[in-house]
Amino acid sequence: MTRDRSIVIIGAGLAGAKAAESARATGFDGRIVLVGAESHPPYERPPLSKALLRGETDPKSTQVHDSGYYGAHDIELITGHAVVAVDIAMRTVHLTGGTTVRFDTAVLATGATPRHLDVPGARLDGVHYLRNLDDSMRLADAIRTASRVAVVGAGWIGTEVAASARQMGAEVALIDPSAVPLRRVLGTEIGAVFARLHADNGVALRLGTGVAALRGASSVEEVVLADGRTEPADLVVAGIGVTPRIDLAAPAGLFVDDGVVVNEQLETSAPGIYAAGDIASAFHPHYGRHLRVEHWANALNQGVTAGRNAAGERDVYSRLPYFYSDQYDLSLEYVGHSTADEEVVVRGDLGDRKFIAFWHRDGTVNAAMSVNVWDVVDHLKAIVGLARPADPLRLADLSITLEQLANRD
C-alpha cells in the first residue's frame, strides 16, 4: 500500500502534469502534489510560437488536462507558488509564502529559462522573450501593432516566431551569426532550405552577423548589427536559446552538468529524486551518453517515466528524441539526435522542399527528418534504432523503400 506515501512534483508544465498523471495511473494511492510558479494550470508550449501566437486557437486549448482532471484524480495542484528550496535530507520542499510540503519521492520538472540579450539597449521597451503563455499573449498583441519585427536568433523558436509574424502580416528581419538558420541542429545544407523558405515568404535575412546594440529613446527603434549595419525595428524578439533551471537542484546537492544529471531511469544523484524535461541531462541507452533535449515530446514522455518511477516502478527511458515544426507550408518531423558536423544524405529534392534527410557518422544513422513527407516517422525511428552502418547510397535511393531500409538484415 502507498496510501501513507507522498510524491511532490516541482514544475507544473507538461512534464510535471504527465508525471502526476502517470504516477496515479500506476495505482499509487498516496498523496500527489504538483506545484507550479505560474498562475495557469499546466499547458503545452508548442502552440505558443505557432497557432496561439497567430490567434488561431485560444489559451484553454493548450491545457494538458481539463479543469476538472486534477480534482477527479486526487492530485493537489498548487499554482502561483514557486518552490524556493528542496531539502533532500528532510524530504521537504519550501514554497513562497512559507508553506512546507513533505515528500517521499519527488520529480524536478522546472524546465528552462530564456537567455537574455547582453548588449547595450537590451532593457528597452519593445524587447520580448517567448517562454510562457503570458509571453505569447503579450507578443501577439505587440506584433499586431508593430511596424517592423526583428527576430534575433534563427533556431527553432526564432524561425517559428518569424514565420508566425509574417503570417500575421508583419514586416520581419531574421538575424543570426550563422550563415543559415538552424545550422547548429541541421547543418549548412539543410539549413539553406530554411533560409530559402523564409526569403520566399518575405523575411529579410540578416545572417552571418550578430547584434551589437539596440537603440531607441525609451522603446527600441533600431538594431545595430555587428557588421555596422542598422535594421529599423520597433519590436525585437530574442530567441537565443535557454538554460536549464538548476537553481533548486544545485543548492540541494544534486549533481548538475548542463542540467540535472540523471540515469536511464531518470533518477538523480539522490535516490528517489527524479528529473524530467528540459532540465534533465539523461543517460540515453541508444547513444550511450547523456543528452538534454528541449522539445515537447521529451517533456511528455520523460514526464511519464519519471512519474511512474517516483511511484515505485523502475522503467528505463529509451525513447528516441522527437520533435516537429510547422513554418508556412513546410511541416517536418525529426527523430534521433545528431550534430551539425555529421554527414547528411538527402532522399528527395531539397528544392521542392519535399525530402527526407539522414544524418550519419561512418554510415550509422543517428537522426532522420522528413519534410513534407507524410506517415514515415515509424520507419525513420526504426532506421535510427538499427544503430549499425548503412550504405549512404541506399539511403538516398528512392527505388529502395523505407520499409526495406528499416528491415535490412
Image: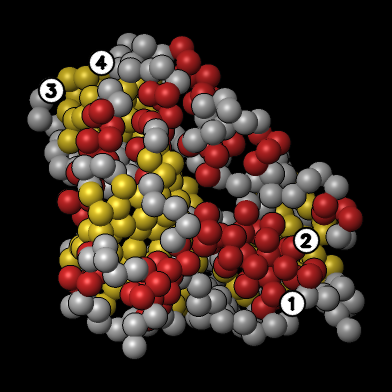
Residue indicated by mark 4 = 232
What's the residue type where badge 4 is placed? Answer: Pro
What's the residue type where badge 1 is placed? Answer: Ala
Q: Nearer the viewer, mark 1 or mark 2?
A: 1
What's the residue type where badge 3 is placed? Answer: Arg
Instruction: Say whether marks 4 and 3 touch (CB < 8 Å).
Output: no
Instruction: Say whether marks 1 and 4 touch (CB < 8 Å).
Output: no
Q: Decide which of tag 1 and tag 4 comes sooner along the chain.
A: 4
Q: What's the distance in space between the residues labelled 1 and 3, CA to CA?
A: 57 Å
For label 1, count other residues whose C-alpha is less than 10 Å away and answer few (under 14), some (14-19) or many (20+): many
Q: Decide which of tag 2 and tag 4 comes sooner along the chain.
A: 2
Q: Decide which of tag 1 and tag 3 comes sooner along the chain.
A: 3
Residue indicated by mark 1 = 311
Q: Decide which of tag 2 and tag 3 comes sooner along the chain.
A: 2
Which residue is painted at 78% across and 61% down in the image?
A: 33
What's the residue type where badge 2 is placed? Answer: Val
For label 3, count other residues whose C-alpha is less than 10 Å away and answer few (under 14), some (14-19) or many (20+): few
Q: Is residue 252 left or right of residue 208?
A: right
